[in-house]
Image (tube, grey):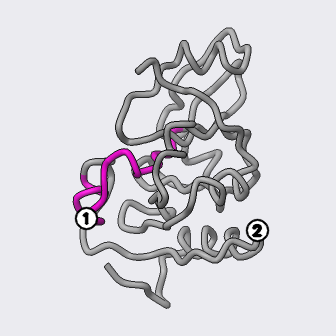
């Protein structure tokens, strides 16, 4: 893993969004892809629960970013109940790219064309350091739970049944 002055453009946008928010965290480039929580945890030497997966949902027709722990599966019914939505589904890959400017497997919590309504899995609070994607499948950014809430404007929410 290395820090690089030659970050991909999508990661530069993430780094700039963090700096603008006053978050002192550097996007890091991984040697290998970290498209899944298990791959990211193995590359970083951390628990899979400390991986903050970025999932884009469509809730009653509007995009919703859910930062969830890699240790469990998001439950669409739990999310729908939490936000009072009647129709919640996973966004299609093209929808994810449209609203974030990033591809599935590399979606960062920030650096999107416009801010997204965000829920942050309350289970992530159990970890002193979290790792989120940095805009590409080969980049990550370390954040605390509090930094993740602050930078996304997210609401800590239960998002899984387990």
Percent coordinates x, y for residue 46 in the rendering: 30, 59
Residue at the location (49% across, 32% down)?
92
Percent coordinates x, y for residue 147 in the rendering: 65, 60
Q: Residues within 10 Å of mark 1 (few under 14, many from 20)?
A: some
Residue at the location (56% across, 60% down)?
144
Q: How many marks?
A: 2
Query: On the rendered structure, is 26 left or right of 13?
Result: left
In the foreground, 125 or 103: 125
Quarter of the image where the N terminus is located = bottom left
Q: Residues within 10 Å of mark 2 (few under 14, many from 20)?
A: some
Query: On the rendered structure, is 124 left or right of 23?
Result: left
Query: On the rendered structure, is 39 left or right of 26?
Result: left
Q: Which residues are magenta?
A: 39-55
Residue at the location (61% across, 40% down)?
120
Q: Is residue 48 magenta?
A: yes
On screen, residue 71 above or below 128: above
On screen, residue 43 above or below 57: below
Q: Are marks 1 and 2 in contact (CB under 8 Å)?
A: no
Residue 132 appears in the picture as rendered: no
Res 162 → quadrant: top left
For the view shown, which residue lies furthest in the bottom direction? 5
Percent coordinates x, y for residue 136 in the rendering: 44, 62
Res 131 → quadrant: bottom left
Percent coordinates x, y for residue 68 in the rendering: 49, 39
Of callouts 1 and 2, the N-terminal one: 2
In the foreground, 48 or 93: 48
Q: Is residue 12 magenta?
A: no
Which mark, by number, is residue 43? 1
Which residue does the numbered mark 2 point to in the structure image?
Answer: 21
Which mark, by number, is residue 19? none
């Amino acid at each position: 893993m290395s820090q690089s002055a030659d970050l991909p453009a999508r990661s530069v946008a993430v780094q700039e969004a963090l700096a603008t928010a006053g978050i002192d965290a550097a996007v890091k480039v991984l040697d290998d892809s970290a498209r899944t929580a298990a791959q990211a945890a193995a590359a970083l030497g951390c628990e899979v629960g400390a991986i903050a997966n970025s999932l884009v949902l469509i809730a009653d027709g509007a995009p919703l970013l859910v930062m969830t722990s890699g240790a469990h599966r998001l439950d669409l019914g739990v999310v729908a109940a939490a936000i009072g939505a009647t129709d919640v589904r996973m966004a299609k890959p093209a929808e994810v790219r449209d609203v974030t400017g990033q591809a599935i497997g590399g979606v960062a919590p920030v650096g999107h064309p416009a801010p997204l309504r965000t829920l942050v899995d309350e289970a992530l609070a159990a970890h002193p350091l979290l790792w989120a994607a940095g805009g590409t499948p080969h980049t990550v950014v370390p954040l605390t739970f509090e930094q993740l809430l602050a930078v996304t404007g997210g609401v800590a929410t239960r998002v899984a049944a387990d």
